[in-house]
Image: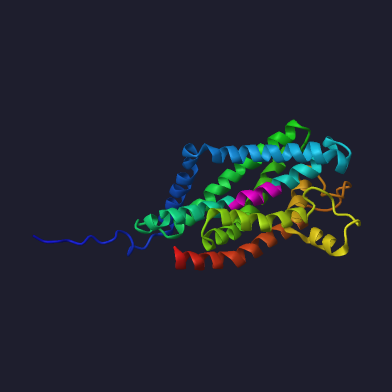
Amino acid sequence: MTTATAARPGLATRVTPVEAFRQTLTLTWRNLVQIKHNPMELVDLSIQPIMFVLLFAYVFGPAMAGSVSAYMPILIPGIIVQNALFASMTTGTGLNADVGKGVFDRFRSLPIARSAPLAGRILADTVKQVWSMAILLGVGLLIGFRIETSWLNLVPAFLLLLAFALLFSWASVFIGLAVDAPEKVQIFGFTVIFPITFLSNAFIPVSDRYPGWIRTIMENNPVSKLGDALRGLLVGHPVGNPAGDQPVGGPALTALLWGVAIAAVFIPLSLRIFRRNV
């Protein structure tokens, strides 16, 4: 009688980039189909955007812009950006939950690229962001928002937003891997995102009524730059510039540079903690 010890499959096998990409897509699909077993996640992605749009439009709109319709060009691009930042936190929450349940330990025993589970989670959450953005835009159109440039501009607007969200999500990945409970991911996330969002022009134009240091933060905030780029693409002008004489390229490039800087900081930190703890 002999006893054969089975080798752990794949751990010594190098995975080609093509295989790693295919495995990433497979795990992306795994994360997406989980919605079937947890439909509340889809409800969150749908109900929360609708609630935010209606509350801000009808509660704050008349006070800030005189009417709901006048507030729409400010609100919809701004709230789409805000929603993208909040949605990026689901990446960290999902990763933290998977690590806590031992899902990543199971993945390590499989002959797959170690990066595939991480990349699959990020890509799946990016797809969910598209759904959430579409809901926001649809509700905005129903209550008076109008695309005043061209419907074709939706493509670069969504691509810009998704690129920024993808880069920003690495901050969420780092938090998700660094803390020991999903609730802490939410706490850290809201602690960061709320100040970034409300110290921007997402919901109100920057004006001289603010102290200088607040105005400086608001003018140079990545949320402000991204919001201005979306407004330029969809309604033809950034906040506070109805003449439309400011090009879209400047705010868009600045927003992307902000995203690259955030990713440059958090990708190495995330990969380091991923290799150490997972």
Q: How many labels were placed on the picture?
A: 0
**Residue 82 belongs to magenta span:** yes
The residue positioned 50% from the left and 51% from the top of the image is 121
Q: Position of residue 120 (x, y in %)?
A: 49, 52
96 left or right, relative to 218: left
Residue extent of the magenta highlight: 81-89
The residue positioned 66% from the left and 46% from the top of the image is 158
Tell me if residue 199 can be seen: yes
Q: Quadrant of the C terminus?
A: bottom left
Tell me if residue 149 can be seen: no
Q: Nearer the viewer, residue 119 or 66?
A: 66
The residue positioned 76% from the left and 55% from the top of the image is 225
**Residue 152 belongs to magenta span:** no
116 left or right, relative to 174: left
Q: Residue furthest left?
A: 1
**Magenta-drawn stretch, dominant element (helix, strand or loop):** helix
Q: Quadrant of residue 255?
A: bottom right
Q: Quadrant of the N terminus?
A: bottom left
65 left or right, relative to 228: right
Q: Residue furthest top?
A: 142
Q: Position of residue 55 (x, y in %)?
A: 75, 38
